[in-house]
Amino acid sequence: MRGRLATALQAPSVLALGAWMLVPLSMTLFFSFQRYNLLYPERSGLAGFSNYEFFWTDPAFGPALANTLLLVGSLLVVTVVLGLALALLVERAFWGRGVVRVLLVSPFFIMPTVNALVWKNMFMNPVYGLFAVAAGWFGAEPVDWLAEAPLLSLIIMLSWQWTPFAFLIFITALQSLDAEQAEAARVDGAGYWSRFRFLTLPHLARPIAIVVMIQSIFHLSIFAEIFVTTGGGPGYDSTNLAFMIFSQALLQFDAGVASAGGVFAIILANIVAIFLIRMIGRSLVV
């Protein structure tokens, strides 16, 4: 009786969650096989796999896929390494450590659009940006970052925002490191790098895996920073899959091709998620 009551109470939430996930996915699948361009509403009907073929053969598809994978990989490397280094630096007690920790975490709470505008106007502007001013001090020519190195510019601004997330996870995990075990290793003559390799890194295996999984899921759908700063250009140099789907849907008004792109993005995200879940599962084995 109690089990049936619990099932009945949970049913509305489960149904609502299922509808919330399945209805958009079903509509995306449906429109991906339809000829549905908002500029030509009279041209409708079943399109088969032509939308997928059009999306895959688009000149922007190759660069968008490569940029997506490069963005995700670069951001994971930079944020994990910097986050771990910062966590190790502020692990020990020193005067003002609480303030330093708050300052290190604060960039993560800035909205993506604001983050992009700050870097675009305050740092990377080739006329009055801080980087241009610093270059002028040394007699160097200012660099138009967003035009000459758009993907690197995105990696820099996104790393600044996401490194605090990795730092927060790592500094929390370091608090649970067995101090007695570390002290015993120090007494036995183990140097800093030996303790880091054989004690700290194994202890951080699970937090690192979790950071990699969570950030990969979010980085696959990066859009706001690209839209605000580079607009996917110059050419396709900073276009990723999310921006390409946006371009098909809201710039070219082709909902069918955009839906096909959405299905491809879902498949890619699931492949990455399965790989990362397996990797995390292996790290959780004691």
Image (spheres, grey):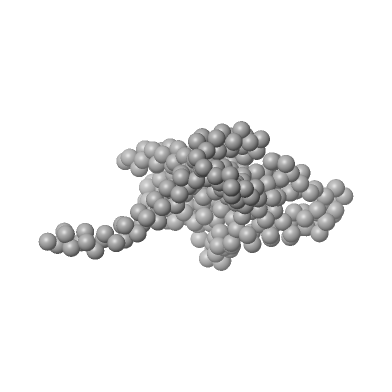
Residue at 55 percent of width and 62 percent of height: 109
Q: Is residue 125 visible?
A: yes
Question: Which quadrant: the N terminus?
Answer: bottom left
* Residue toward you, 47 or 133: 47
Front position in the image: 286 or 194: 286
Q: Relative to 16, is 139 above or below?
A: above
Compared across the picture, whether 13 is left or right of 253 comes to left
Estimate the x, y position of residue 184 in percent, counting from the top left.
38, 46
Please determine whether, in this image, residue 195 is positioned above or below residue 161: above
Residue 73 lies, in percent from the top left, at 56, 40
The residue drawn where x is 51% and y is 34% is 49
Q: Quadrant of residue 151?
A: top right
Which residue is drawn at the image coordinates 55% and 56% (left, top)?
164
Does 281 appear above or below 90?
A: above
Apparent side of residue 70 relative to residue 45 in the rendered image (left or right): right
Note whether residue 75 is visible.
no
